[in-house]
Structures are given as structure tokens and as C-alpha cells.
Image: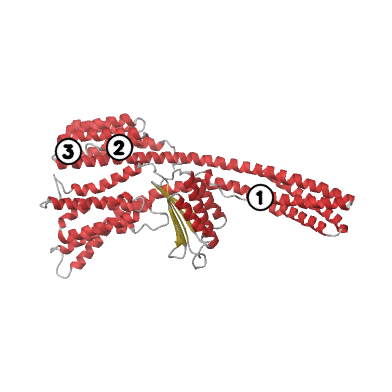
Amino acid sequence: MRTDGNPRQWPRIADLGVPFLVAAVQFLLIWFLADGSGDPLVAVALGLASLALVWRRAAPVPALAATILLSALAVTASGTADAAIGGLADGVALYSLAVRRGRRQAVAGCLTAYVVGFAVFLQYVQGPGDLVANGLLDAVYYVGITAFGQLRRQRRAARDGLRARLAEIERESRAAAAAERERLAREIHDLAGHHLSAVVVHAGAAARRGDPELIREALTVAAETGRDVLRSLSGLVDVVGPQADGGGLKELLPPLCHGLKRLGVPVSLTVQGRARKLSAEVTTVAYRIVQESLTNATRYASGAPVRVTVRYLPRAVVLTIDNEPPAGGGTVPALGGGRGVRGMRERAAGLGGALRAGPTAAGGWSVAAHLPTGSGHGWGWPGVLDSVTVVFCAAPPVLGLVPPEPLVTGRPVEWLALIGAVLVLRAVPLWWRRRAPCLVLGTLTLTDSAFAVACGLWSEDLLGLLVLACPAQLISVYSVACYNPRGRRTWPAPLVAPVPWGLGLGLLLAADPEVTTPGTAPFAFTFGLVIAVLVTAPVTFASWAWGLTIASRSRGWEDTEHDATARASEAVRAERDRVAAGLNGTVLDRTARLVAAADSGLAGAEADARAFAGSVAELARDALTETRALLDALEEST
């Protein structure tokens, strides 16, 4: 969230800076590609396309149309389909359109850019392989840009909504606290003021007259009235847990977890995936499972940290409640008679889900529930982006096997088809990179390591395909840092990812007779492994750091919303606690003593009843005075 400086300064700088950067990159590239010479029309068209980007925010549709046509003109005039000439300016314009317009316009812009670009390329096709390769890469390029832009649009809308929600929560918090304060003051006045005043008058009059029958009647009324006051005032400040029907998990779970924090239980709440509104039935079951699990944690492992994780999947929500072993060592004992766990399991089964509960290896306790949520909302742009990611990582090494410039030659078609299938299948696990990032990285690393070893032993010319396949490892490292649950270590990921490259280089050096001599092959292999890891580690660590940055920003917004929601609920609790403290220390104490005195007078001799009636009147007067003082304090804080 940008809070310093002129909020319009950055957009103005970007409006001019991005077109200048695009123009500079394109002019430098065509200068080198053309050896300092070229058609002036190309430079003019690219310059105008870059200039059109100045209006990409204010008028994204005309800016995209202009860049598409001018880029097509530049490609036609240049006599080549080089990506340095066409595709850069219209890609920037398409991203701006996707960020600032809805799904229909974004998809229409994507299709237009792709069709025009592909049609212009047709005049330079060098065969079926070239046609398929460029058509596929262009599709990945334009669809990927559109997906990124639409996701950026959704995140921006979500953050704008969150800002409005935070302001609303702040207003609601103040209003709720004031309303609760007024309600409590009104209830205290009606419950205590009227009844205690009647006791003062009735008991005082009976004590002065000395009539035994009237005194006994006054003491009986005082005892009953005092008990009514105690019961009413005690129930007035009871904190009742929220009902699941009152909102979604986003509104219900933060107050529940923060309420336990106030009692000294270290509870953390983590939300993974995009939170969405669930049905009332699913919300109720999810809330009750978390509530029961937290109750068990405080009962059987008091003081031990508890982690609550809510994970939104396309068709389900997964709840995980983990608590560490009790303070001072030992393990969490069996949870009573098991009725609570059995009830949670029955709730989950009623939705068609499942629940698992049991001890952990470390001596703690874990509850995991999988609750189906229905058909969900389809893929959405995250699904589109995941599909583009799989294709983007599978296409380059496969295209390295086909004409016009294959990296591998002289092999049977069947053999090339088998290698291509292996390269495609290795990229498929990236589809699950958001849900199981560590598993995806491990699977990809093992697959690439086996491929590198096989190539190093039997077919060294295939190792070049592993270089073309490197984006998959970088994306998996990014996913581990970005999507791994909070609190888990992710730093080994950028060290694990380069292992296949190290194996490949080590085997190449070990098998090279110009590098190794008899007996030095192990040293050459180790040297190649270490060098490859050290050289590629900066790139993998950069991907890891970027994933951490994105995760930190997203979780920061989530934490802000959780804290604000919890504070709004706690504002009402604070007023109740404040009134409870005032009642417990003064009014309730005096009223309890009043009831005890009245009961003693009724149980004692008639000669002592008059004295007890006087004491009852005095205690009622003191309780009434304390009640008025509490009401005055509440009024002053309004």
C-alpha cells in the first residue's frame, strides 16, 4: 500500500517510462540484428507503437489496437518475424487492457493480438514445425499476459474492497462498542436500580416499624429480589460465542482465535487460497470443528501453541488444527471419552467429507477435516495461468526436437516421440504447484535428475533439452516460497532445484577424455556438480526471494483483515469485560452480601430479624450507590 508522496506521481512516471523503455529495447535490438542498417519504416512504426503506450491506462482499447497494427506493419516492413520487432509493444498494451477491463474485453484483445500476429507470421513460415512452434508459443505468450493482467485486476479489486472493508470495520467497531455500552447501561438501570431501590425502601420501613411479620416479609422479598438481581447481572455480561449463521469463516474464525489469545493461548490463523463465501451448512460445520478442536487444545494441552489453517480448494475447504505438546514436555492425552472427536467426524461425514484426528510424532495433536463445497466456480484465471505454465514449461524442450532447427538429429521418429512425451509429462505436476509445491519440486527434481543421468550415460546430446526445460524448476522454486504454508522452511528449495543440472554437468566432465585422466573421474564429477549448483543458485534464489515477497504481501493483507475483524468483535467484549469488572467488584458483592443477610435473618430468631433488616437496607443502599457510580462512568465514556 503506497502511503508516501503524491499518489498520482508513480502512474505518471510509468506512463512515460514504460514506453521509453520499450522503444529503447526494440531500437537497440533491431540495430544489432540489422547491423546498423534497416528500413526506416520499421523504426517509425515501432516508435509510434511505443508512443501509443503512453495512453494505455487512459484508453487501453485504442492503445492496444494501435500497437497491434503498428507492430504488424513493422514486421511486414522488416522482412522477418523476429520477436524483437513484433510482440513487445502489443504485449504491454494487452496487459494494461487486461488489468483495466473485464473478462470479455480482455479475451477479445487476446484473440485479436494472437490472430493478427499469427497472420503476419504466415508469410515467413519455414515448414509445419515452424508453424506449430510459433503458433504454440504465441498462444502461450498472449494467454499468459491476459491471465496475469486479469489476476492483477482481481487482486487490485480485492485490495480496494479490503480498504473499504477495513474502514467499515473501524466504524462498526466504534458503533458496536457504543451500542453495547448503552445497552448494558440500560439493562443495569432496569435490573438493578429498580429492584435495589425497592429493597432499600421496603427493608428500611420494616426495620423502623419493628413489626415481626412485616420484617419477615421484607427479608423474604429482599432475598428473592437479590437472587434475581445476581442472576440477571451475571447473565448480562456473559460472553457468548458467535453463531456460524452470522457470517462466513472470514468473519467468524478471527474473533474465535483472538479470543483465546486474550486468555493466554497462543493461536495462529493462516488462510491459504482465495477465501470465498461458503454455504451456511459448510460454514457451520467448519466453525464447530475449529471451535471443538480449540476447546480440546485448551483443555488437554493448556498453553501449547495452536496453528489453525484454512485452505480453500476449487471444490472443498480443508481445515487443519495442530497443537504442540503441552508445556513442560509429555504428550497430549487421549481426548476424554472421544465424544467430541466422534461428533466432529459425524459433522464432516454429513457433508460427504472426512475428518482425521490423532497424535503427532512430536507428541502433539492434529485434526484435519476435508469438507466438500460443491461444484466451485470453475477454473477461473488461476486455472488458466496454471495451464499456460504447464504448456510454457513443456513446449521449449519439445520444440527443440522438431525442425527447422532441432537440437537432436539422426534419431528415429519413434525415439524422438518417446523423449517428447517424457518432456511433456515432467511438466504436468506443475498443475498442482499451488496445492502441493514441495511435492511438485521433489517430483520435478527426481525426474530431471533421472533424465540427466540417463543422458550423461547414454546420450549426451539430449542434455541441451534440459537447459530449455529449466523454467519448470524456477517456477517450482517460486511456488514453494509463495504457496507453502506459513512457518515451514523453504530455503532448501533453491539449493535442491539445481541438482539435475549439476548431475548433467558432472557426468559430462567425468566422461570427457580431454578433462579427466584415469582415476580423476569422481573428482571431475564432483567439480561439475558443485560448479553447476553455485552458478545456477543465484537464479534459483532470485525465484525463491520473489516468491517470498509475493507471499509476504498477500499474507500482510490477510493479517490486516483478520486483526481488524477481531478488533471489531473485541470492542464489544471489552465493554462487557469493563462492566463485568465493575459489577464483580462492587454491585454483585454487595448484592450477594444482601442475600446472605436476608437469609440469616429469616433463619434466626425474631429478635435478631430487625437488625438483619437494617443491614439488608444498608447493603442495598450501598449496592445502589455503586450501580449509579458505574452508570455515571459509562455515561462519561460515551
Neighbours of disc 2 within 10 Å: few (<14), some (14-19), many (20+): many
Residue 92: which numbered mark, if any?
2
Neighbours of disc 3 within 10 Å: few (<14), some (14-19), many (20+): few
Distance, label 3 to label 2, CA atoms, is 26 Å
Q: Quadrant of the C terminus?
A: top right
Residue shown at the point (51%, 51%) measured from the top left: 288
Distance, label 2 to label 1, CA atoms, is 63 Å
Along the viewing direction, whichever of 73 and 586 lies nearer the viewer? 586
Neighbours of disc 1 within 10 Å: few (<14), some (14-19), many (20+): few
Residue shown at the point (14%, 51%) measured from the top left: 414
What element does badge 1 sit on? Answer: helix
Q: x and y percent of residue 372 in the render?
A: 42, 48
Tag 3–tag 1 contact (CB < 8 Å): no
> In the shown orientation, is residue 543 left or right of residue 2?
left
Give the residue furthest to the bottom: 519
Q: Which kind of residue does numbered mark 1 sit on?
A: Gly
Identify residue for label 1: 235
Residue shown at the point (49%, 57%) measured from the top left: 342
Point out the tag, 3 or 2, that comes first from the N-terminus.
3
What element does badge 3 sit on? Answer: loop
Q: Which kind of residue does numbered mark 2 sit on?
A: Val
Along the viewing direction, whichever of 11 and 251 lies nearer the viewer? 251
> In the shown orientation, is residue 401 left or right of residue 618?
left
Q: Quadrant of the N terminus?
A: top left
Along the viewing direction, whichever of 590 and 597 lies nearer the viewer? 597
Give the residue furthest to the left: 410
Identify residue for label 3: 36
